[in-house]
Amino acid sequence: DADVTQTPRNRITKTGKRIMLECSQTKGHDRMYWYRQDPGLGLRLIYYSFDVKDINKGEISDGYSVSRQAQAKFSLSLESAIPNQTALYFCATDPSGGRNEKLFFGSGTQLSVL
Amino acid sequence: QQQVKQSPQSLIVQKGGISIINCAYENTAFDYFPWYQQFPGKGPALLIAIRPDVSEKKEGRFTISFNKSAKQFSLHIMDSQPGDSATYFCAASLLQGAQKLVFGQGTRLTINP
C-alpha cells in the first residue's frame, strides 16, 4: 500500500497567517488529491493533480492554492487563513491510472484557525 | 449541490446486531460506488465497492446492496463488533475519466459491547 505522509499532524494558527500543509508519498502514484473533512459535510475535494504539470480545482478551491513540486510531493497552502478553514485536511493518492478505483489517504492534518 | 446523500449521521448498534447505512445519489452516470472506513486519527481506507451491474456484493460481514432504479445503495454490517466502531463514508464516481469521487456526509457508527 501507498505510504502517504502528511505534515504537520496538528497546527494552530491565527487569522491572516499563511499556512502550508505538506504531503509526500513513496509509491510513485501519479494522481494526488487534497480533501477537507468537516462534521456533517463529509470529504470535499479542494484540488487534485494528475501529474507534475497538471493542477485542477476541486469543489471548494477558493482560499487555497497548491504546488506539485515533484511526483511525490503535493503541498496545500492557505494564503491568508480564516476561521472557517478550521478542518481536518487529508492528502490522498490514486494508483489506478485513471480508473478511480482506490484512494490511499494520509493520516490527516488537523488545522485550527483562531 | 450534494450529489451523494448519506444517512444516518450517527448510529448506535449493540454487539452482534446489524448495522445499516444508506446512501442516495443523483447522477445516473455514476458507475462505481465504494465505501470507506475511517478510524479515529486515521485517514479513510477503502472497505468494499460495487459496480451497478450487480445488486449485491459481500465481503465477510460487510455487504453492499445496490438498487439502480431507486439510485440508492447501502452498507450492511452483520454481527457488528466493537472493532467496527468507526466513521463510514459512501462515495460515487465514474470509473473511467476525470470525474472524481464524490463522498457522502459520513456516518459515525458505535457498536456497544
Image: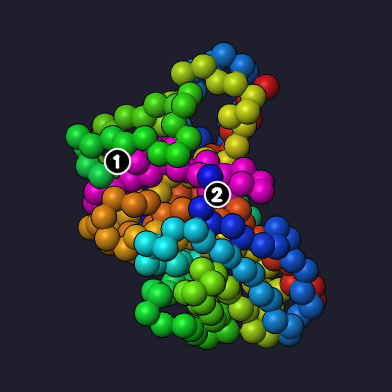
Q: Is residue A100 visible?
A: yes
Per the image, the residue denoted by label 2 is B2
Position of residue B18 relative to residue B108, above or below, is below
Q: Is residue B82 magenta?
A: no
- The spot of residue B67 in percent (x, y) is 51, 77
Position of residue A88 relative to residue A16, above or below, is below
B66 relative to A3 in the view: left or right: right
Judging from the image, mark 2 belongs to the subunit labelled: B
Q: Residue at x 45, y 43 (%)?
A: A45
Judging from the image, mark 1 belongs to the subunit labelled: A
Looking at the rendered structure, the secondary structure element under dot 2 is loop
On residue A49, the disc is 1
Q: Residue at x 26, y 32 (%)?
A: A69
B5 relative to B32 in the view: left or right: right
In this view, the residue farthest toward the left is A53
Residues at marks 1 and 2 on the same chain: no
Magenta stretch mostly in which secondary structure?
strand
- Between B73 and A66, which is closer to the camera in this rendering? B73
The image quadrant where one finds the N terminus of chain A is bottom left
A92 relative to A15 in the view: left or right: left
Mark 1 or 2, which is nearer the eye?
2
- Between A70 and B59, which is closer to the camera in this rendering? B59
In space, the residues marked 1 and 2 are separated at their CA atoms by 23 Å
Residue stretch rendered in magenta on the structure: A22-48
Number of marks in the image?
2
> On the image, which quarter does residue A38 sit in?
top right
Position of residue B89 relative to residue A73, above or below, is below
- The spot of residue A106 in percent (x, y) is 45, 49
Q: Residue at x 55, y 20 (%)?
A: A81
